[in-house]
Image (cartoon, grey):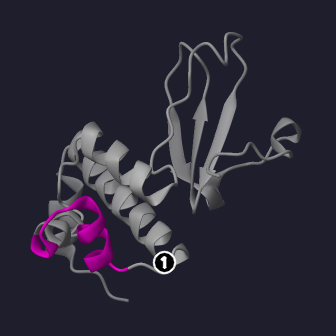
Amino acid sequence: MKKNPRFEERRRSIPKEIDVYVTRSFDIVDRIHEILKMKNLSQKDLAFLLDKKESEVSKWMSGTHNFTLKTLIRIEDILGFPIIKVISKEKYKEKQPILLVVEKKYSHIIQGQDILVGDIQDLEIKQKYQKPTPYLS
């Protein structure tokens, strides 16, 4: 596929935090869609369960909605599956690296250091990561 050079230049000029924000927003919506599909539900069903208008849920699912934590927790509760996962500091007191793989992205986390995020095809799997860590139930 041929890329438009003007578009690519514009895309490269977007600040990193905006790019990450948009990516995470779409990841959240993709996760909700995945759960709805698993449960054989539609956006209309989700709106009914949340006691919201169908148009409001449709806006949320566009990928540009800034979900509040309260809304995400309510959706998780209603659907019965986690949407996001927070890693407790208590659980990982040692400075052991943690590797999370979700779809085709990975995060490499070592407490007190920067979080590395990238595409799974760029990840060199080391021996200590051969055993997967459960992320989503």
Task: Say which residue appears at 67% left-offset and 50% top-offset.
Answer: 123
Left or right, 10 with reference to 24: left
Q: Quadrant of residue 32?
A: bottom left
Task: Say which residue appears at 31% left-offset and 76% top-offset.
Answer: 45
Residue 21, position in %: x, y?
A: 26, 47
Q: Which residue reaches farthest bottom?
A: 1
Residue density around tag 1, few if under 14, some if 14–19, many if 20 or more, within 10 Å: few
Residue 136, position in %: x, y?
A: 61, 50
**Magenta stretch: residue 57 in it?**
no
Residue 36, position in %: x, y?
A: 44, 72
43 or 120: nearer the eye? Answer: 43
User: Compared with residue 80, is residue 135 higher up or lower down, i.e. above or below?
Assistant: above
* Residue on which disc 1 sits: 37
Name the amino acid type tagged 1: Lys
45 or 57: nearer the eye? Answer: 45
Quarter that holds the N terminus: bottom left
Q: Quadrant of residue 79?
A: bottom left
Specify the segment rendered in magenta. 42-55
